[in-house]
Image: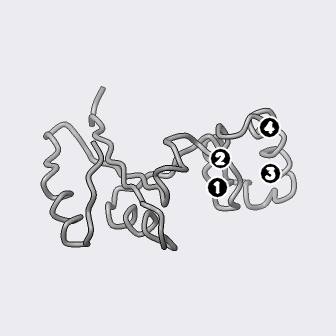
Amino acid sequence: MAQTIQSLEGFTRKIRALNPAIDEVLLYRCHSDRIQFKLLPSVLRDRKLVDAEYAILRELVASHPGEFAADTTTLEQLARVQHYSLPTRLLDITWNPLVALYFAAKENDVKTGEVIVFRIKKTL
């Protein structure tokens, strides 16, 4: 349910009112333009990137082997690849709602930013 919030005070009031259950944690994701961006990893937004994902990852790892030497899983490599601003199948999320708000509002002159709240169970 989308709610328009006009101030930091209003945002913090809404976040404090969420009250997760004892077996839940809250995680946050943002978009600087809720019309343009969907809750979809960047690599899945373009079919050409999906087809080239493996090659992009292999090329970057081969170009910077020292930076990926400690990575033992593809997940670790994908997390590192995001710091190179390359598209991945991962979504950036944060524990901190103010971090999400910052990126939702960053360089946002006219567009409407969005902070998405995830309620995640602590156990399966």
SS state under label 3 = helix
Residue named by callout 2? 78
Residue named by callout 3? 61
Residue 103's place in the image compared with 45, above or below, is: below
Q: Which mark is on residue 48?
A: 4
Counting residues from the N terminus, which is met first, the one under dot 4 or under dot 2?
A: 4
Is 99 on the left or on the right of 4, as rendered? right
Measured in 3D between alpha carbons, the distance from the residue under mark 3 to the one under mark 4, in whole angstroms, is: 20 Å
Residue at (28%, 47%) from the top-left corner? Answer: 26
Q: Which mark is on residue 82?
A: 1
SS state under label 1 = helix
Q: How many marks?
A: 4
SS state under label 4 = helix
Q: Amino acid at mark 4?
A: Lys
Mark 4, Cα crowd under 10 Å, few <14 / some 14-19 / many 20+, is: few
Mark 1, Cα crowd under 10 Å, few <14 / some 14-19 / many 20+, is: some
Counting from the top left corner in percent of width and height, residue 114 is at: 39, 55
Q: Are marks 4 and 1 in contact (CB under 8 Å)?
A: no
Measured in 3D between alpha carbons, the distance from the residue under mark 4 to the one under mark 1, in whole angstroms, is: 18 Å
Measured in 3D between alpha carbons, the distance from the residue under mark 4 to the one under mark 2, in whole angstroms, is: 18 Å
Closer to the observer: label 3 or label 1? 1
Counting from the top left corner in percent of width and height, residue 106 is at: 48, 71
Q: Amino acid at mark 1?
A: Gln
Counting residues from the N terminus, which is met first, the one under dot 4 or under dot 1?
A: 4
